[in-house]
Image (cartoon, grey):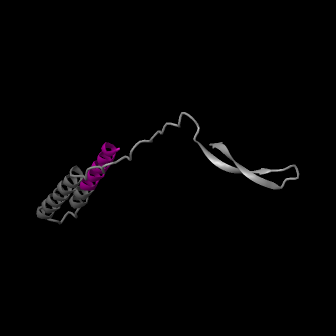
Amino acid sequence: MSKLMTRMVGGVAVVAVGSMLVAGSSTSASADAGSAVAAGLFGGAAGVMLVAAVARAAPPPVVVYGPGPVYVEAPLRPVCHMERRPVFDEAGYPVGSRPMRVCY
C-alpha cells in the first residue's frame, strides 16, 4: 500500500509542478523574459522540495503482537475430598451427619 501511496503523491507532485510551469509561462505578450525564467525556477524549486518530501516518508509503525494462547491440561482424575453431610430420617428431619466423599 505504501508503494501505491508514493506513486499517487508523486503523480500529484508532477501535476502541481506542471501546472505552476504552465501558469508561469502564460503571461501577456508585453511581459519580459525574466518573469518567465523566474516562474520556471520557482516551479522547479517547488517541485524538487515536494519530491524530496515524498521520498523521505516516515517508516511504517512497528506492530507488536501479544503472547499466544496458553493451553492447560485437565487433571487426569477428579478432585475429591471428604465432607460431612447431613442424614435425614423418613419424615425429612435431620438426625445427624456422616462423612462422605465429594468429587468435582
The quarter holding residue 16 reads bottom left
- Residue nearest the observer in this picture, 88 or 68: 88
- Residue nearest the observer in this picture, 18 or 56: 56
Q: Is residue 81 magenta?
A: no
| Image location of residue 63, percent across then percent down | 34, 48
Q: In this view, does 92 lie to the left or right of 47?
A: right
Q: Where are the magenta residues, as a range?
A: 1-18
At 19% across and 53% down in the image, what residue appears? Answer: 52
Helix, strand or loop for the magenta stretch, by majority:
helix
At 65% across and 42% down in the image, what residue appears? Answer: 101
At 27% across and 49% down in the image, what residue appears? Answer: 10
- Residue nearest the observer in this picture, 46 or 57: 57
At 18% across and 57% down in the image, what residue appears? Answer: 49
| Image location of residue 61, percent across then percent down | 30, 51
| Image location of residue 100, percent across then percent down | 67, 44
Residue found farthest to the left: 34
Indicate whether 79 appears above or below 30: above
Indicate whether 35 appears above or below 17: below
